Image (cartoon, helix red, strand yellow):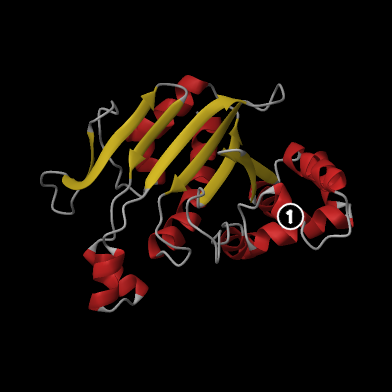
Amino acid sequence: MDEVFRALADANRRRLLDRLNERSGQSLRELCAGLEMTRQAVSKHLAVLEGASLVVTVRHGREKLHYLNPVPLHEIADRWVGQYERSRMAALSGLKRSLEGTAMSKPAYVYTIYIDTTAEKLWAGLTDPEFLKQYHGGWAPSSDWTVGSKVLWPVEDGGEPQDLGQVVTEAQPGKRLAYTWHTLQPMHQEMFGLSDAEFAEAAEERSKVTFDIEPAEEPGLGMKLTITHDGFTSAESKMLEGVSGGWTMMMSQLKTILEKA
């Protein structure tokens, strides 16, 4: 937490966070544009922000893209803000929709969280039904989590699980898990206020979520979990809007579950 306060103490670093808050997923070149700082100075400030986990980077081709990570700020708020403010702060901690006005060939949503656990337990947290139910509101997906296997969802009447077209694309226990995401379902049409034509177009979008597990950069922080959810057709994607807040809250719950286990 000390690293976060030190990172925020500099006005230039706060300015960089503001720019990422406006549009996450920017390259160093994009972040330097319009600033009265050298490229080297911006790079140094970004390194401090990354060291404090306020910024997460992802390689995309030859570029390194920078994403705002609100988790440390949320943890600070959660520590000192009263219970009556928690829900509002949780909503504010969700990543803003990224890549506005730019090509959606970049990862659209990236989120990193540090969990004091082992790689094996974290993998179980992502695949074991008993763990999944605890932070999916009882509606946990099921699969044998091997490449090519389907990811199924339960139904209200307790019948056969639904096949929404989700398939596991990568599975390295303790390291990496990826699977295609479901499309918008009929219940989402009313939720997002979409016309029939808008819903028909939006329902064709098929995105993918990837979980990367690795040891934290510093001893004592446990494991680093990075979620990348991409494949959205535009910055206005309703699915992107939904998963951005959803993953943030669910991974915070998973952290609590695993660290109490």
- Can see residue 128? no
- The percent coordinates of residue 88 (x first, y second) are 59, 65
Residue of label 1: 31
Corner quadrant of residue 77: bottom right
The residue at 44%/62% (across/down) is: 234
Count of numbered circles on the image:
1
Q: Amino acid at mark 1?
A: Leu
Residue 154 position, x and y percent, is 21, 46
From the top left corner, tell me how far across and down residue 28 is, in percent: 72, 48
* Image height of 151 relative to 235, above or below: above
Quarter assignment of residue 214? top right
Q: Residue furthest front?
A: 62
Taking 217 as reference, is 253 above or below it? Answer: below
Q: Is residue 2 left or right of residue 239?
A: right
Q: Secondary structure at mark 1?
A: helix
Tell me the residue at 84%/41% (across/down): 44
